[in-house]
Image (cartoon, helix red, strand yellow):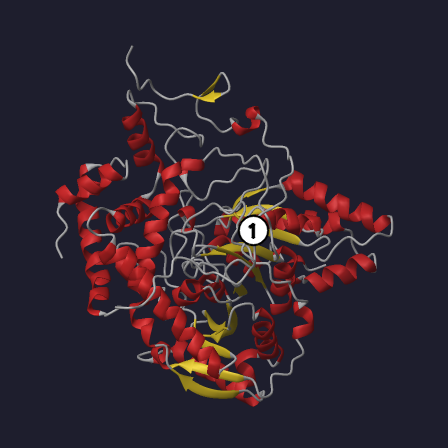
């Protein structure tokens, strides 16, 4: 068993043939994760006890001849903004350093019910705010492809553990690109499903109208399998969708002949770079598979960054108001009055990026500015959403880059928050419109840094999105051009 | 657009956020550059465009209602397990009313 290369299908076959037990896979993953972690800091903790119990339960079911589930014995990592009962969940923040949740997120319940083995909690930017994983209070994650570089963010740990092979799949969260961008930086598959496709119950809220839980995998099928397990209506999240969950495996036929692909011209303007060249080679490979490619226009793209950073900071400032020193473990010791207790606790507990977003959000919602910023941004959000609806009247899927550049060096962009925000340009529009989108590996630069191709489809069209991604992967990615 | 340190302190007060003097000056700089970019939105005419607060899908009006059935809630002790200062089954805070 080569733990770093295992797939969900490989584990299922190996368990069936009695080549190994779920407990053996679990021990191998825990051992490998423990050995790799000093290099990457991708795990904040390993949940060995819980993992062993889950693996033993799978082995017991198999011994009785029962179906152990779609994820039987599969080592999974969970981003530390997703709560796990009895297992510390910090959100990468000092504020929650000792927080032990009293319940499991719905996605966590479902993946364990399907036989998944949670081996640890993945590091991330504080409260999922960041594009480099450098905003974690517990130190940055290093990219397993190149340890001098960032893994992307905010789900940097979730991407890194799948890339290094210490987990087979993982859960991340995406508000403005936090799954797709680290997937592209680390060379793995990352999926942001339709808004509401996966319950947000137990996902610590950042910007509720934009937050998604989604999967990472080393191939499209593994990510799709994890999504299928966690997706579907949940009465604990009123915004979770009623639409039935399809069998995504059936969509992955390898046949994409006649599929209509749109290239939004606004996403390629000025993209004269290795990244742009690789995406165009990816598009050539799709043409060879029989896709019809045409240019489309999403004119409101120009306003997307401004729109996003108004809405997400406004929602964040409201959501983060709950960390006030009363309920969640941390309280500054030096306060005499209630007001000082709030202020000091929040001043001590939040890192620089959280403070920046709380301040921006409070500003745009404050008296006299609400109409000019928040209401304006909501109108622009309509325009962005309408652009996509119009495009999907003409084409089945859109292809774009995920990030303007590959993984950058640690510290390179830390002093310029605006530059960091601007790098989210290709990923935030999908979240604003609530459509499914994913990053699929699309070759590497001359320096060996992975590049991701983004595929976007209309609401609940994850099936066609996976068909396209899997056909591309099957044809060898850019090598198929 | 100019953001003064006084404005920063006013907004920090609204947000119940203590900032050090260094943080205040850094915040004024950062907010000025970010809001300067965001202000571009005002060049766009959005007259008549509806505001979009949420991604919504068609469903029956009462679809999100569940049956009115009794369900176990978190026990008091569990709900308080993360409290910095629990006491007598409550969250304790500094005194707000003088006797």
- Secondary structure beneath dot 1 equals loop
Q: Looking at this rendering, what residue extends furthest in the top direction?
A: B99
In this view, the residue farthest toward the front is: B61
* Residue plotted at (58% across, 31% down): B74
Image height of A439 relative to A312, above or below: below
Most foreground residue, B16 or A412: B16
> Residue at horizontal 29%, vertical 72%?
A302
Q: Nearer the viewer, residue A196 or A138?
A: A196
Q: For mark 1, what is the residue? A: B64
Where residue A400 appears, x then y in whole percent? 43, 76
Q: Is residue A90 above or below residue A372?
A: above
Q: Is residue B3 above or below residue A290?
A: above
Rendered location of residue B44, percent (x, y): 23, 70
Quarter of the image containing the N terminus of chain B? bottom left
Query: Is A292 on the left or on the right of A31, as rendered?
Result: left
Residue A398 drawn at (x, y percent): 47, 77
Q: Is residue A256 left or right of residue A405?
A: right
- The location of residue B11, given as percent across then percent down, is 22, 42
Q: Left of A175 or right of it: where is A120?
A: right
């Amino acid at each position: 068993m080569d733990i770093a290369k295992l797939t969900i299908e490989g584990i299922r076959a190996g368990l069936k043939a009695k080549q190994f037990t779920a407990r053996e896979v679990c021990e191998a993953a825990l051992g490998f994760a423990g050995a790799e972690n000093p290099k990457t800091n991708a795990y904040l903790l390993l949940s060995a006890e819980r993992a062993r119990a889950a693996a033993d339960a799978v082995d017991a079911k198999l011994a009785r001849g029962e179906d152990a589930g779609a994820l039987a014995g599969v080592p999974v990592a969970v981003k530390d903004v997703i709560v796990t009962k009895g297992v510390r969940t910090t959100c990468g923040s000092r504020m929650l350093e000792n927080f032990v949740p009293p319940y499991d997120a719905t996605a966590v319940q479902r993946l364990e019910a399907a036989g998944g083995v949670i081996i640890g909690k993945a590091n991330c930017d504080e409260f999922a705010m960041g594009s480099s994983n450098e905003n974690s209070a517990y130190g940055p994650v290093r990219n397993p492809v190149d340890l001098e570089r960032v893994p992307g963010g905010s789900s940097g740990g979730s991407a890194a553990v799948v890339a290094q092979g210490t987990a087979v799949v993982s859960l991340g969260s995406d508000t403005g690109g936090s799954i797709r961008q680290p997937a592209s930086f680390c060379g793995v598959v990352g999926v942001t499903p339709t808004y509401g496709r996966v319950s947000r119950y137990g996902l610590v809220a950042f910007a509720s109208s934009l937050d998604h839980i989604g999967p990472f995998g080393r191939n499209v099928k593994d990510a799709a399998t994890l999504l299928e397990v966690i997706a579907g209506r949940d009465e604990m999240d009123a915004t979770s969708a009623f639409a039935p969950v399809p069998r995504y495996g059936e969509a992955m036929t390898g046949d994409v002949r006649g599929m209509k692909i749109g290239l939004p011209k606004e996403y390629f303007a000025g993209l004269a770079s290795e990244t742009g060249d690789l995406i165009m080679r990816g598009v050539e490979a799709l043409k060879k598979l029989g896709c019809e490619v045409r240019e489309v226009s999403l004119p409101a793209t120009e306003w997307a960054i401004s729109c996003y950073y108004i809405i997400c900071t406004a929602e964040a400032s409201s959501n983060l108001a709950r960390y006030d020193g009363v309920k969640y473990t941390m309280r500054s010791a030096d306060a005499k009055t209630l007001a000082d207790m709030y202020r000091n606790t929040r001043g001590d507990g939040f890192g620089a990026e959280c403070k920046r977003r709380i301040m921006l959000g409070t500003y745009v919602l404050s008296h006299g500015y609400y109409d000019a910023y928040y209401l304006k941004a909501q109108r622009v959000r309509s325009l962005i959403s309408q652009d996509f609806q119009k495009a999907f009247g003409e084409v089945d899927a859109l292809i774009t880059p995920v990030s303007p550049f590959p993984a950058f060096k640690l510290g390179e962009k830390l002093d310029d928050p605006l530059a960091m925000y601007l790098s989210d340009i290709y990923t935030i529009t999908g979240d604003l419109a609530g459509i499914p989108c994913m990053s699929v590996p699309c070759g590497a630069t001359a320096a060996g840094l992975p590049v991701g191709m983004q595929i976007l489809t209309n609401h609940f069209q994850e099936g066609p999105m996976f068909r396209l991604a899997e056909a591309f992967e099957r044809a060898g990615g850019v090598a198929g051009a | 657009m100019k953001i003064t340190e006084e404005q920063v302190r006013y907004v920090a007060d609204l947000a119940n956020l203590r900032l050090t003097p260094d943080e205040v000056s850094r915040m004024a700089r950062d907010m000025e550059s970010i809001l300067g970019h965001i202000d571009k939105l005002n060049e766009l005419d959005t007259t008549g465009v509806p505001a979009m607060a949420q991604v919504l899908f068609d469903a029956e009006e009462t679809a999100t209602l569940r049956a009115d059935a009794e369900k176990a809630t978190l026990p008091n002790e569990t709900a308080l397990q993360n409290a910095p200062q629990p006491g007598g089954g409550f969250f304790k805070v500094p005194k707000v009313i003088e006797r």
